[in-house]
Amino acid sequence: MATTANQVFIAVIGAGGVGKCFLSQLSALAKRRPTPKLNLCYISSSKKAVFNSDYSVGIENVLQELASSSKSPMALPQIADYLAAAPSKAILVDNTSSQDIADAYPLFLSRGISIVTPNKKAFSGSYKLWQDIFTAASISGAKLYHESSCGAGLPIISTIKDLVDTGDEVTKIEGVFSGTMSFLFNSFAPVEGAGGQWSAEVKKAKDLGYTEPDPRDDLNGLDVARKLTILARYSGLPVESPTSFPVQSLIPKELETVSSGDEFLEKLPQFDSQMEEIKLAAEKQGKVVRFVGSIDVASKAVKVGLETFDKSHPIAALKGSDNIISFYTKRYGSNPLIIQGAGAGGDVTAMGVTADLIKVISQIA
Amino acid sequence: MATTANQVFIAVIGAGGVGKCFLSQLSALAKRRPTPKLNLCYISSSKKAVFNSDYSVGIENVLQELASSSKSPMALPQIADYLAAAPSKAILVDNTSSQDIADAYPLFLSRGISIVTPNKKAFSGSYKLWQDIFTAASISGAKLYHESSCGAGLPIISTIKDLVDTGDEVTKIEGVFSGTMSFLFNSFAPVEGAGGQWSAEVKKAKDLGYTEPDPRDDLNGLDVARKLTILARYSGLPVESPTSFPVQSLIPKELETVSSGDEFLEKLPQFDSQMEEIKLAAEKQGKVVRFVGSIDVASKAVKVGLETFDKSHPIAALKGSDNIISFYTKRYGSNPLIIQGAGAGGDVTAMGVTADLIKVISQIA
């Protein structure tokens, strides 16, 4: 195989919902843009992998090949070795939500391997990991993009980076950061009409694939807390972890320890009156309740939980599983820069990953 | 002077409102990021210039130096020669709205000089110029960014490029694209209260610096038409020019030919009843009137003009001089991706230019 600068090598970890959409976008991209040549050289699911000593795994039909492969995934240090030895620059696309892979980012970056990922864990884990990641990238010159770690394909991370990189100061960020929570509250407490029962809406969201397999992984607020941790850090606050500020969980205490998501859903109706009370209290004031997050930079206050909004407020008027995020900055003054749209879904999440990949390629190839 | 890859040379044309804000951001950027070294090597206003054979014009105090300079600006081909001969990669920052400079972009790009600019003229002039520009960049590999040509620092151009580059299809774009028009209609026909007289609001906007020196340059709708031309082209419509689709002008026919902006403002009150009628007709339907633009890709329809909106519509509820732009795409489905915020102002416009500069530097240095 010829060694030229006009090609890049791409390893993909993860072939779930986002991973499949990404592969489809990668295939189309490779056809639209023949230069530089995009060589898929590794792909793995949690149990299987496809790779070879030629670094050439065809993008077409790779999912079938993966399903029938007899190879196990390489260990992470082995993947780093494999990519560092590629005939040209290499990019790791981490389409998982694995903490183990996130923990290995400093290793990959220090070996000159660029990373694009929707994985929140790397940027919302310990502050030390955050520092190690950016230090490793800065020393080696490897690139690192993670747009889809917050708001899927919405331009949230790129916007806060542009604001800060050009010398603006973020003063406050607030909004609805979870597609799942948005969907739940837009149906449970709509601006017009009565809305459904809380437990029924949670079940519906699960059936539609809008929640994690165990809905408690959405209702505990940790997903939103992770996104706020990332944005707070870019705003200049060295937030230690997503559990180092107040996060309101919507899991009734009594159901925190039940053994399965199914058991949780079965017992949740017993607690509907709690959420109903909250909804009615808001309605009495002519308001609706929403699950939001906010960062106040001056007071270093980050918080996640329920708040009430006038029915005319943009947060109240959201639809479907849309996110809305308002950036208040020194330059933008009292009228924030606002970004709104689908914050979840395979295709729009993969779009953020593919756009990041294009940015990395434009810098390294 | 040492010739190293770790520096870039920057020429700035234009030292008006945006240019001054940009220089201040450039100065801060150079201090925050010592690598690669940013060498300002040329700056010009319409009448004067500062440059030297060393390619080293200090960024600090450069405006004073420019004011007292005895040098005239170089001719454009001469600037291209100068930059092409720089000791390392060069970037032209065009902070003007000059058609002449826009017409020279293919020359600069073909000589490997990257360009960042808020100048709309290059991308909304003839379709041939658009093609020449992107062909020249593609052949030479020079980079070209123009975020602030639409919506100032709002991530409009980057978003449409990411959508299209990742294989999404834009189906419709609509919104308020002019900070001036937004300000005028938010005061003339507010959602709550009576609003002012049309001519008085135009005068107020001019006094606040929100309009061009001759307000007719905003009221003719051409500025909005230019932005739509750019977005339509990125959406795949080969729009010939900003005058090749319907654009409603708010200049009364009788005042199109008066000799000055001042005379226009003096005579405008005679025509207030026309705008008042439009406002009242909307009010009778419980609506407000706004100046908007839209692109429908399937029907290839681009248009600019007055439309009425329910008072609860996000376009009706805009504040100040905010823009709001909704992207409808195949992937995003019925809920658009929406970006809202200040679409005019020196600092936020310069922010888009500076962010673009950072992107170019990351690719060429």
Image (cartoon, coloured by chain):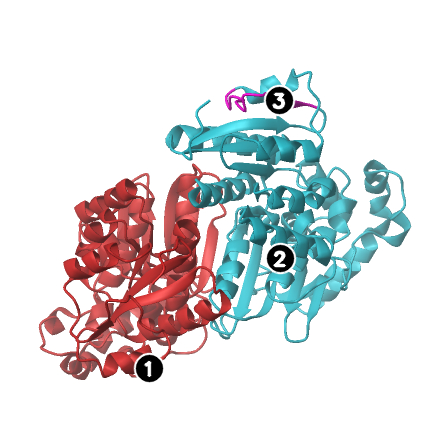
Chain colours: A red, B cyan
Query: Horizontal placement of B363 versus A61: left or right?
Result: right
Tell me the kind of residue under disc 3: Val
Chain to which mark 1 belongs: A
Residue B50 badge = 3
The image shows residue A32 at horizontal and vertical percentages of 50, 68
Marks 3, 1: nearer the viewer: 3
Vertical side of A264 occupied by B55: above or below: above
Q: Are marks 3 and 2 on the same chain?
A: yes
Cα gap from disc 3 to disc 2, whole angstroms: 39 Å
Q: Secondary structure at mark 1?
A: loop
Tell me the kind of residue under disc 1: Leu
Query: Horizontal placement of A338 versus B257: left or right?
Result: left
The residue labelled by disc 2 is B176
Q: Secondary structure at mark 3?
A: strand
Cα gap from disc 1 to disc 2, whole angstroms: 35 Å
Which is more N-terminal, label 2 or label 3?
Answer: 3
Cα gap from disc 3 to disc 1, whole angstroms: 63 Å
Residue at image point 24% right, 44% down:
A136
Residue density around tag 3, few if under 14, some if 14–19, many if 20 or more, within 10 Å: many
The residue labelled by disc 1 is A208
Chain to which mark 2 belongs: B
Residue density around tag 2, few if under 14, some if 14–19, many if 20 or more, within 10 Å: many
Query: Was residue A203 drawn as part of the magenta stretch in this picture?
Result: no
| Magenta residues (range) | B48-60
The image shows residue B64 at horizontal and vertical percentages of 59, 18
Residue density around tag 1, few if under 14, some if 14–19, many if 20 or more, within 10 Å: few
